């Protein structure tokens, strides 16, 4: 009986010796992650470069690991970072605490926070695992202006949230007057609904 068991054991070993290897040369050949992989967070922008984040802190409230810190600030007509009244003046994610559950993504009302497929987040120190707003913001694409800048003529907050911008950023028609000079769409002439 023991000889039969030994042959069965060696049979498993010999079968694995002639199979194709499943390991990869990882640092040189990066594997492709799944499309729905939860990786590093990205703070998205509107087509003209303004930030989508309005500093509401709902992502921080939804985070079960308390890994997100948001400090909201108020936009002015001269210093506009987002189309709404507020923006995130400080935004930090601590990847030493983050469990990549995606609850912050679901809580975001403006869809400003998404997760990328980037998984290489290893750092030498814990302090380097705290990503700031500058590290998380999506890069500026061609035609985008670096915030702060005013909203442009004809663009209202509703247009921004519905994604119905007619002439974003410095693309065709960007020589329009700033939003604050145009007034509201009802013709009242007050900027941002203030009088």
Image (cartoon, helix red, strand yellow):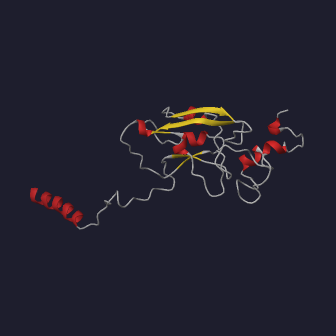
Q: Position of residue 4 (x, y in %)?
A: 13, 60
Instruction: Identify which residue, 126 or 174, lies in the foreground.
Output: 174
Q: Position of residue 20 (x, y in %)?
A: 29, 66
Splitting the image into 4 quarters, where does residue 122 fall?
A: top left
Splitting the image into 4 quarters, where does residue 72 fall?
A: top right
123 left or right of 142 in image = left
Q: Quadrant of the N terminus?
A: bottom left
82 left or right of 155 in image = left
Q: Position of residue 162 (x, y in %)?
A: 73, 49
| Vertical relation: 80 (above or below) 164 | above
Q: Residue furthest right?
A: 187
Q: Residue at x 79, y 42 (%)?
A: 180
Q: Residue at x 72, y 54 (%)?
A: 168
Q: How many marks?
A: 0
Q: Residue at x 48, y 33 (%)?
A: 65
125 left or right of 192 in image = left
| Vertical relation: 70 (above or below) 44 | above
Q: Position of residue 19 (x, y in %)?
A: 27, 66
54 left or right of 119 in image = right
| Vertical relation: 176 (above or below) 98 | below
Instruction: Identify which residue, 37 or 96, lies in the foreground.
Output: 96
Splitting the image into 4 quarters, where does residue 171 fall?
A: bottom right
Q: Quadrant of the C terminus?
A: top right
């Amino acid at each position: 009986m023991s000889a039969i068991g030994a042959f069965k054991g060696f049979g498993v070993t010999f079968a694995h010796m002639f199979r194709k290897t499943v390991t990869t040369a990882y640092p040189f050949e990066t594997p492709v992650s799944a499309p729905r992989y939860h990786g590093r967070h990205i703070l998205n922008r509107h087509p003209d470069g303004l930030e989508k984040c309005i500093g509401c802190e709902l992502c921080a409230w939804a985070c079960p690991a308390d890994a997100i810190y948001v400090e909201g600030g108020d936009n002015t007509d001269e210093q506009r970072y987002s189309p709404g009244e507020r923006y995130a003046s400080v935004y930090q994610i601590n990847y030493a605490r983050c469990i990549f559950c995606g609850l912050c993504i679901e809580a975001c009302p403006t869809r400003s926070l998404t997760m990328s497929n980037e998984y290489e987040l290893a750092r030498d120190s814990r302090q380097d695992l705290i990503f700031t707003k500058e590290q998380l913001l999506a890069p500026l694409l061609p035609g985008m202006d670096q915030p702060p800048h005013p909203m442009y003529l004809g663009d209202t907050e509703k247009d921004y949230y519905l994604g119905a911008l007619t002439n974003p950023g410095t693309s065709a028609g960007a020589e329009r007057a700033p939003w604050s000079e145009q007034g509201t769409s009802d013709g009242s002439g007050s900027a941002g609904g203030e009088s």
